[in-house]
Image: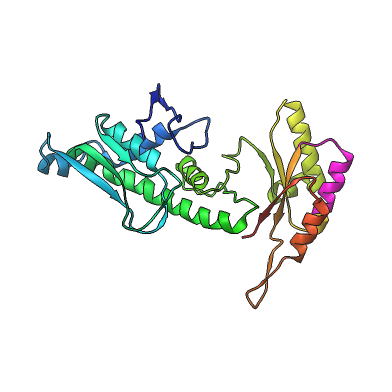
């Protein structure tokens, strides 16, 4: 894998096997700088400065501790080069590849001091991302041909990284935040006075502000699904997706009742994308 190009204050993603999602107000470079500064503080690695000769060079290896999907390779390379552009990083795997326990899948060569400074930040990101990607892959395989979406319930400050890991694991991204998609949920419906009133308010807002974006509405009952379909059949609407919330009912014996979900999907009949959410 080649070194990642830096353009101004942002990172070029051209060399990445799987590109991260985009966010309008922050990017990977800012996340990396914050993570390194968090570790280094105002003095740097005092233990390294005390014990490791300045000019000592070493070669360190990446070893998989368990089976799974590897994620964070492109990010790790960028972290190493943020600490020291002269570090040489090589990989035999790409983001999204399966690795077996015990596999040596990469190495970094250069000044020992700088490798150690970057090490924990690199591992923190790679371990978190690989865990997310591995679980996502398992769920994506089980759900196929439906696909897995993530949520906004991410670690503060790490949304871009967490959502990137989902992509690497074979899932898809939902909205990045509150700004890039209209998502009408129960609290909006209650405040607006009902499902129909909420949809009317959203359509009016988008028209008045000349905005074009996806619109999703949450439904909790078959009656709400019918209300959404009735509104959309009578009115030009920006609606693109209907969420079916908690329509899979757990049973005392451990099974689930999906009859309500099946009926809702039959009512929608392919007119809109459907998203199933169960808490």
- Residue 222's place in the image compared with 256, above or below, is above
Lateral position of residue 256 relative to residue 132, left or right: right
227 on left or right of 143:
right
Give the percent coordinates (x, y) of residue 200: 80, 39
Q: State left or right for residue 57 relative to residue 269.
A: left
Q: Main secondary structure of the magenta part?
A: helix
Q: Is residue 69 above or below residue 26?
A: below
What's the residue at 31%, 57% (across, down)?
102
On the picture, is 108 further left or further right than 270? left
- Say if residue 99 shows up in the picture: yes
Check if residue 242 falls in the magenta segment: no
Q: Indicate the quadrant containing the C terminus: top left, top right, bottom left or bottom right.
A: bottom right
Q: Single out the residue that lies furthest toward the right.
A: 234
Does the magenta-highlighted stretch encompass residue 233? yes
Magenta region: 225-238
The image shows residue 210 at horizontal and vertical percentages of 73, 25
Q: Is residue 194 visible?
A: no
**Residue occupying the point 34% across, 30% down:** 3
Q: Nearer the viewer, residue 58 or 150?
A: 58
Locate residue 176: give its quadrant: top right
Furthest residue in direction top, as rendered: 8
Question: Residue at (33%, 44%) from the top-left corner?
Answer: 122
Specify the farthest residue to the front.
92
User: Looking at the picture, how far across and down is residue 71, in whole percent?
Assistant: 42, 46
Question: Total marks drawn?
Answer: 0
Location of residue 10 in the rendering, given as x and y in whole percent from the top left corner: 43, 26
> Quadrant where the N terminus lies?
top left
């Amino acid at each position: 894998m080649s070194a990642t190009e830096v353009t101004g204050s942002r990172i070029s993603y051209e060399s990445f096997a799987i590109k991260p999602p985009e966010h309008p107000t922050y990017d990977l470079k800012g996340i990396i700088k914050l993570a390194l500064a968090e570790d280094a503080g105002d003095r740097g690695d005092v233990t390294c400065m005390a014990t490791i000769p300045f000019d000592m060079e070493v070669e360190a290896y990446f070893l998989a501790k368990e089976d799974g999907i590897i994620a964070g390779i492109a990010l790790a390379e960028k972290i190493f080069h943020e600490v020291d552009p002269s570090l040489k990083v090589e990989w035999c795997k790409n983001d999204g590849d399966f690795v077996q326990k015990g596999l040596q899948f990469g190495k970094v060569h250069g000044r020992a001091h700088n490798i150690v400074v970057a090490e924990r930040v690199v591992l923190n990101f790679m371990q978190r991302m690989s865990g997310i990607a591995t679980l996502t892959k398992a769920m994506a395989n089980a759900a196929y041909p439906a696909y897995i979406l993530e949520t906004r319930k991410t670690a503060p400050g790490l949304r871009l990284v967490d959502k990137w890991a989902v992509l690497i694991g074979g899932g898809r991204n939902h909205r990045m935040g509150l700004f890039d998609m209209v998502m009408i949920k129960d609290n909006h419906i209650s405040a607006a006075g009902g499902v129909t009133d909420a949809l009317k308010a959203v359509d009016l807002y988008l028209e008045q502000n000349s905005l074009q974006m996806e619109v999703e509405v949450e439904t909790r009952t078959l009656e709400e699904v019918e209300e959404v379909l009735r509104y959309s059949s009578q009115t030009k609407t920006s609606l693109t997706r209907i969420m079916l919330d908690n329509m899979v009912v757990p049973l005392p014996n451990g099974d689930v009742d999906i009859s309500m979900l099946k009926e809702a999907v039959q009512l929608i009949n392919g007119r809109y994308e459907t998203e199933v959410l169960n808490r």
